[in-house]
Image (spheres, grey):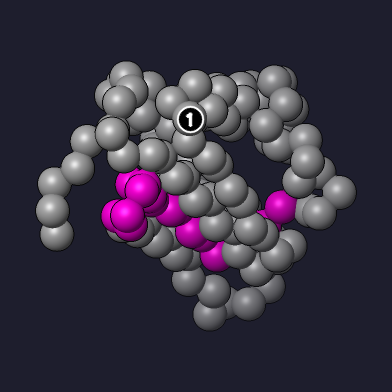
Amino acid sequence: MGECIIIGDKFKLEQVVLNLLSNAKHAADEKERQCRNENYQKRIVVKSWINEQNVCFSVWDNGIGIHPDILEKIYDPFFTTKNEEKGTGLGLSIAYGFIKDILGEIRVDSNLGEFTNFEIIIPKQ
């Protein structure tokens, strides 16, 4: 594959990736805690790819998923489903803002109790 360039603050992009990984870990840990199925194995899958116009990556987990009723709120500042010790509700809001600032897109697909997949699409320069 060829080399490509995106324009953006590498530390902010790192923060986006770390936040998505942290959320995926929390979701998988929470499902393990709630799960009665002793065969459940936590999984987090990170993928990256390049197409004609974009650099893309995704973070998928087989955790608790996101309830459809709150899907539209997940990027709101201070919105969280975690308790006070585990989350501030700023991670996805900051990630969303940064990705939008670099003209990218953040997408989410989730089935409650099954999986969540975040996809980041950033235009190539």
Q: Nearer the viewer, residue 8 or 69?
A: 8
Q: Looking at the picture, how far across and down is residue 87, in whole percent?
A: 61, 27
What's under tag 1, amino acid-wise?
Leu
> How many numbered marks are there?
1
Q: Can the viewer see residue 101 in this picture?
A: yes
Query: To which residue does mark 1 refer?
Result: 103
Question: Quick check: is 22 in the magenta stretch?
Answer: no
Please determine whether, in this image, residue 37 is positioned above or below residue 77: below
Q: Nearer the viewer, residue 112 or 117?
A: 117
Name the image quarter holding residue 111. Answer: bottom right
Q: Residue at x 79, y 53 (%)?
A: 67
Q: Residue at x 13, y 53 (%)?
A: 2
In the rendered structure, which segment of residues is drawn in magenta? 50-66
Q: Looking at the picture, how far across and down is residue 25, in whole percent?
A: 48, 49
Please determine whether, in this image, residue 19 is positioned above or below residue 33: above
Question: Quick check: is 62 in the magenta stretch?
Answer: yes
Please determine whether, in this image, residue 88 is positioned above or below residue 14: above
At label 1, counting other C-alpha atoms closer than 10 Å, the crowd grade (few under 14, some 14-19, many 20 or more) is few
Q: Residue at x 66, y 25 (%)?
A: 89
Q: Looking at the picture, how far across and down is residue 1, in whole percent?
A: 14, 59
Question: Which SS class for mark 1?
Answer: loop
Quadrant into which the C terminus falls: top left
Please determine whether, in this image, residue 120 is positioned above or below residue 100: below
Q: Residue at x 43, y 26 (%)?
A: 102
